[in-house]
Image (spheres, rainbow, N blue to C red):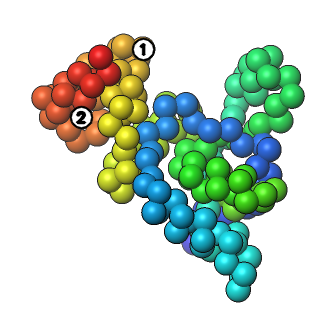
Amino acid sequence: MEERQEDKVVFVELSKIIPLPLNVSIIDPEEDMMLRTDMTRVETKGWYKIDPILLRRLSPQEIEQLRTEKPWSVAEYQIIDGHKRFYAAKELGWSKIRAIITDATLEEARAINYMKNKARGKVDPLREALYFHHLYEDLKMTMEQIGEKFGLTRQRVEQILRRAK
């Protein structure tokens, strides 16, 4: 079986990673503490105690725009899944983290982030509403299209959108 680039786990410098706008994940304090405990165990390097994070490669245009806004930025990747692991690694003083890199657009990354967190039952209700508002207002998707994309009824999409107000 042929190995795809997306199947490979690599080490990425934390300084080259930025968070995803409209990340919908939420974690309770107890889970956060358990994550940090796993990441600081001494019996093996903390890197191997957690799953790799999922990153998307920024396009040359996105990198150029980012450097215009923040000239000091060296970012090349954006988190799709693994925000809490990323922030914990930074706080623990790690310089790099294990990651899987994919070529996804910003909108594909947002959808993957939503679906992964929804499957885990870890979605912040307000962020979910803001994400759906973005799909509805900015991308001009109908409530039916949003529902179809995520396996929700039109009524459920409407309830979620009401929270954004």
Closer-to-camera residue (1/125): 125
Most distant residue in the right direction: 72
Q: Which residue carries the number 1 mark?
A: 138
Quadrant, the C terminus: top left
Q: From the top left corner, tell me how far across and down residue 143 is, in percent.
A: 23, 23
Residue found at x 40% / y 28%: 131
The answer to whether the residue labelled 2 contacts the one labelled 1, judged by CB atoms less than 8 Å apart, is: no
- Mark 2 to mark 1 CA distance (whole Å): 18 Å
Q: Which numbered disc flags the more N-terminal residue, 2 or 1?
A: 1
Mark nearer the viewer, 2 or 1: 1
Q: Is residue 150 above or below residue 38?
A: above
Amino acid on which the number 1 mark rests in the picture:
Asp
* Image location (x, y in percent) of residue 145: 26, 26
Q: In the drawing, what numbered circle is on residue 16?
A: none
Q: Left or right: 19 with respect to 12?
A: left
The residue nearer to you, when weighing 160 against 98, is 160
The quadrant of the picture occupied by the N terminus is bottom right
Q: Which residue is mark 2?
A: 148
Q: Secondary structure at mark 1?
A: helix
Seen from the viewer's position, the closer of residues 37 and 25 is 37
Q: Residues within 10 Å of mark 1 (few under 14, many from 20)?
A: few
Where residue 150 appears, as percent x and y from the top left, is 28, 39
Task: Check the image and report above or below for 119 versus 58.
Answer: below
Callout 2: SS: helix
Q: Quadrant of residue 9?
A: bottom right
- What amino acid is labelled 2 in the image? Glu
Where residue 155 sits, quadrant-wise, is top left
> Is 89 situated above or below 158?
below
